[in-house]
Image (cartoon, rainbow, N blue to C red):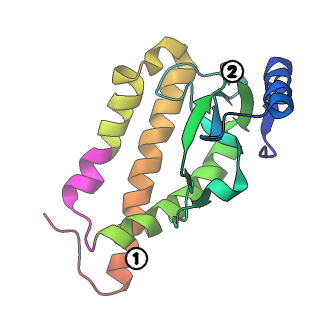
Amino acid sequence: MVAADERRTDTLQHGMRRVLQTGPASDVAGFGIPRRNFFFGRWIRGGGIYPDYQLRLFRHSAGRYDDVLLHENLRLSGRIERFVHPMDHHSMPGVREHVRKMIRYSTLGAQEKLKARSRVTVMDLAANHLGTIFKTYVLRGGYRDGVHGIIVALFAGMHTFVKYAKAWEVLRARGQGDVKR
């Protein structure tokens, strides 16, 4: 199974065929495939975005999806092996698409946040996005991707801020008060 914006490379395709022909070991439930994420036409190596392993080849009877709204995960019982060769993921061709996706995903992210917490603090609104930018750009090496890296880091931080602001907005509409200090 591959998403609409993902492409299998020839080397990955060859490796997958070989596994399917020979059959995996009996204790292998699935295979993680490294995913090269392309933002604005460039493969982003830093920022914690690569190798971004995704389960795309797995035994259907070996697991189930968890119950989250955003980026649900397949939980497998059994060993997971990893392919070396990647697939390509072209999810952010431009700023417009990135903003559109951020609006949708931040709403889902806010809904997920509100499953686990009943308030949004000043610190959540004032600092989490700055921490995300720092983590993405500095700690996870986004700076190595130049201008693309700073754009990715700033979008990551903006996504975090908008997610918490949307959670705050929902709580406020419910009459659960303003931001807590």
Position of residue 20 relative to residue 29, above or below, is: above
Residue 181 lies, with reference to residue 89, above or below; the image says: below
Screen quadrant of the C terminus = bottom left
Q: Residue at x 37, y 71 (%)?
A: 114
Q: Is residue 85 above or below residue 27?
A: above
- Residue name at image x 45 percent, y 45 percent: 158
Residue at mark 1 to residue at mark 2: CA–CA distance: 36 Å
Left or right of 107 on screen, residue 120: left
Let me know if residue 148 appears in the view.
yes
Which disc number belongs to residue 42? 2
Q: Amino acid at mark 2?
A: Arg
Three-letter code for the amino acid on which mark 1 is drawn: Val
Residue corresponding to mark 1: 170
| Front position in the image: 33 or 58 | 58
Q: Earlier in the sequence, mark 1 or mark 2?
A: 2
Query: 119 above or below 137?
Result: below
Q: What is the span of residues highlighted in magenta in the rendered image?
A: 118-128
Residue 153 is situated, as x and y percent measured from the top left of the image, at: 46, 31
